[in-house]
Image: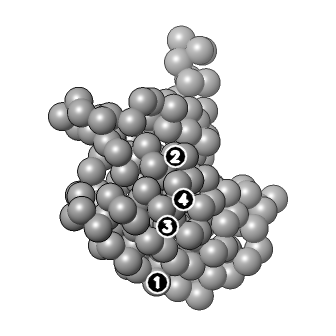
Amino acid sequence: MRLRIYARRLAPLALLFGIGTGISAPPMSAEGREAPLVAATKASDTATVQALLAQEIDVDAPEPDGTTALHWAAYQGDAEIAAVLLRAGASANAPNRYGVTPLTLAAGRGDTEVVRALLDNGADPNTALPEGETVLMAAARAGSVDVLRLLIARGADIDARENWRGQSALMWAA
């Protein structure tokens, strides 16, 4: 019983750090075929990403858990590939199966450049995981004052509270 409680409490952290999110899964599409755009993004191969997009490949083609190439670019802090994907129309708000968006991953890294690009392309600054953890909370945990300022300037709710303990981003920053 106690183990299950701890597992539930650690789940949001695991999601943000890529454990159990498919971040380590092989690059396969939802149909079980290789997702070449995801593979090229994982390899930080900008030239291949651009070549694939020139072939009109689906920019939002997901892995089986819903993770897209943009998730990977945000997770890796690859602002160049993130910009290429966003220009090609990648969804800045696409959640994976666990509710993790590219903005959640970038904020959790404290990556100002990727967070700004995602927000400029329509990412919701009030995105939250199913348990209520917001991107503002993820940025607070990362200790990124610049990302916190950017999210607040773009309308992030500083009073939002997560569902387990009712904690706010301010509590997470402490």
Q: Residue at x 78, y 62 (%)?
A: 143
- Discs 3/1, front: 3
Q: Of the residues shown, which amino acid type is indicated by label 2?
A: Lys
Characterize the local packing of mark 3: few (<14), some (14-19) or many (20 or more) Cα atoms within 10 angstroms.
many
Numbered tag placed on residue 82 in the rendering: 3
- Tell whether label 4 touches label 3 (CB within 8 Å): yes
Q: Pick out the residue farthest to the right.
A: 174
Numbered tag placed on residue 151 in the rendering: none
Residue that numbered label 4 is attached to: 74
Q: What element carries label 1?
A: helix
Q: Pick out the residue farthest to the left.
A: 31
Q: Of the residues shown, which amino acid type is indicated by label 1?
A: Asp
> Mark 1 or mark 4, which has the lower sequence index?
4
- Tell whether label 4 touches label 1 (CB within 8 Å): no
Is residue 68 left or right of 61 when viewed as pictured? right
Q: Is mark 4 on a helix, strand or loop?
A: helix
Q: Which residue is drawn at 49% across and 67% down?
A: 82
Is residue 13 left or right of 172 when viewed as pictured? left
Numbered tag placed on residue 120 in the rendering: 1
Among the 4 quarters of the image, the one containing residue 2: top right
Q: Is mark 2 on a helix, strand or loop?
A: helix
- Tell whether label 1 touches label 2 (CB within 8 Å): no
**Residue 11 spot, x, y in % from top left:** 54, 34
> Mark 4 or mark 2, which has the lower sequence index?
2
Q: What element carries label 3?
A: helix
Distance, label 1 to label 4, CA atoms, is 14 Å
Distance, label 2 to label 1, CA atoms, is 23 Å
Residue that numbered label 2 is attached to: 42
Would residue 60 be seen by someone viewing this image from the given angle?
yes
Q: Residue at x 51, y 46 (%)?
A: 42
